[in-house]
Image (cartoon, rainbow, N blue to C red):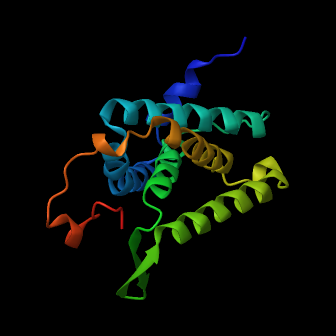
Amino acid sequence: MLDYLPFATNMFLHGGRLHLILNMWTLYLFGPAVEGRLGSGRYLAFYLACGLLASVAHAVINPTSAVPALGASGAISGVLAGFIMMFPLARLVIVTPILFFLFFFQVPALLFAGLWLFTQVTAGIAELFMPQAAAGGVAWSAHTGGFVAGLALTPLLRRSKQAYRAYYADEGVLGFNPSGR
């Protein structure tokens, strides 16, 4: 008998502190903007649906995997897809440490997401051809599945522009202006 509960509960477990920290950091960066456009209730439904669909994608692509799938990465991938769909012209500040120096540069959000998705898909395909013992234990297909779920669900759950919250004059300087730039 197939147990369906892990498809929902795995997004609340993590493989260690670093996994949890990176997931929560990414959710902190992209989640509030997506929640602002969807509304709190729709955002919760969106997040859970992306996590569930990510788990299904992982199970379908890796049906014989003995490695447990843990983490909110699939759901957060959906949030990233929602962010890209609603704020395609946004620019992200990326921090790159080189030796002892931190370098900051801006990247268009669409380019960032495209490169991120490319790495997820290519790593997932490469892992399919590896012996299971050599695989790294990362649920690449869950990341991709969550992203695709986010692309599909965002237009369905997005509120009309009249329902967006009011923007204030200083947000055009430090955040998004009303046009999403």
Name the side, left or right, on which 133 lies relative to 113.
right
Q: Is residue 137 something that shows in the picture?
A: no
In the displayed orientation, state which residue is furthest to the left.
Answer: 169
Name the side, left or right, on which 66 lies relative to 42.
right
Residue 76 picture location, percent across and down: 47, 47
Image: 179 above or below 63: below
Q: Name the one closer to the observer, 21 or 177.
A: 177
Q: Is residue 27 something that shows in the picture?
A: yes
Residue 110 picture location, percent across and down: 53, 67
Residue in view at x 52 percent, y 46 percent: 78
Figure quadrant of the N terminus: top right
Name the side, left or right, on which 164 lies relative to 24.
left
Give the number of callouts: 0
Residue 49 picture location, percent across and down: 52, 31
Residue 83 picture location, percent across and down: 44, 54
Figure quadrant of the C terminus: bottom left
Q: Name the one closer to the observer, 12 or 107.
A: 107
Name the side, left or right, on which 116 lies relative to 89.
right
Residue 125 occupies quadrant? bottom right
Residue in view at x 36 percent, y 88 percent: 100
Image: 7 above or below 35: above
Image: 115 above or below 22: below
In the displayed orientation, state which residue is furthest to the front.
Answer: 162
